[in-house]
Amino acid sequence: MGSTTKPRWAAFARDTNETKIQLALNLDGGAFPPETDARLKAATEESHASQTSKSQTISINTGIGFLDHMLHALTKHAGWSLVLMCKGDLHIDDHHTAEDVCLALGYAFASALGSASGLARFGSAYAPLDEALSRAVVDLSNRPFCVADLGLKREKIGDLSTEMIPHCFQSFAQAARITLHVDCLRGENDHHRAESAFKALAVAIRNATTRIPGKEGEVPSTKGTLSV
């Protein structure tokens, strides 16, 4: 069975005047595509947001520590392998870097996923972090839409503006071509509220992208298609 299952992976680079991003993603953990940029392979030892196990390789360096932390949580609990590097214009502010990283990650997700045929399509999850509790609901709809209500109060968490956190979800959903609703239902600490939201998204995505035995090749839609 493993020999006939196509790897769900992608390697991607996005270079603009504002950010330079390289990443490689495997939605099922494990190895990266052969075309992965050699700089990424070398970067796995340089990032502080890194973790290696028998099933996952994670290394993230965006230049924004709290964003690295959130993407690390997303990757770990989604079951992905991800290596990502970004050099952005942080001398201006965090906007371009946070936005472009999440756009690039969403695009890589869509490329790695390919067709939703044979998949669960829908996924939902709750994730707590101490007093905080968040809910995420995902539809692999090919109809990008995002509603994110996190109720954050601080101006920044670390070096990431809190206004950019819902924008990160929006950017990811747009490029990934998914419908995403994510809400923090309760919590006093903004770090906990944000992290529980990313963890809820991770589990919801893992559920939505699960292969359903016996449904191979079947489009999970009454229309018979999820294409544009």
Image (spheres, rainbow, N blue to C red):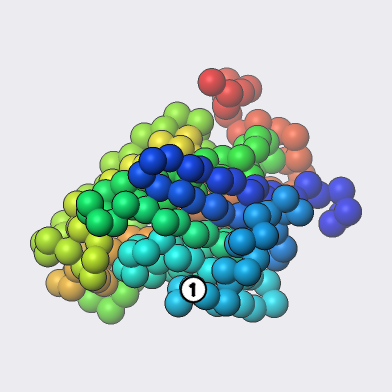
Q: Is residue 191 above or below residue 36?
A: below
Residue 44 horizontal/vertical position (percent) = 58, 71
What residue do we see at 46% from left, 49% from top? 20
Q: Estimate the x, y position of residue 106 in percent, counting from the top left.
A: 48, 44
- Residue 132, position as x, y percentages in the image: 25, 70
Look at the image and tell me whether residue 70 can be seen.
no
Q: Nearer the viewer, residue 123 or 193?
A: 193
| Residue 4 in the figure: left or right of residue 160 | right
Q: Position of residue 195 (x, y in %)?
A: 33, 67
What's the residue at 20%, 58% (across, down)? 161
* Left or right: where 46 falls relative to 197: right
Q: What amino acid is found at the position of numbered circle 1 in the picture?
A: Ser
**Quarter of the rendering containing residue 147:** top left
Q: Is residue 12 above or below residue 153?
A: above
Q: Is residue 88 visible?
A: yes
| Horizontal relation, residue 118 to residue 109: left or right | right
Quick check: 106 above or below 29? above
From the viewer's perspective, is residue 157 above or below residue 90? below
Q: Which image quarter is the C terminus in?
A: top right
Q: Classify the position of the N terminus by image quarter.
A: bottom right
Find residue 138 and report its image quarter.
top left
**Number of numbered discs present?**
1
- Compare residues 19 and 134 and report the one nearer the observer: 19
- Would you name the residue on which mark 1 appears? 47
Residue that appears at 65% across and 48% down: 10
Residue lying at 61% horizontally and 55% vertically, measured from the top left: 24
Q: Is label 1 in a helix, a strand or a loop? A: loop
- Label 1 CA crowd tier, 10 Å (few <14, some 14–19, many 20+): some
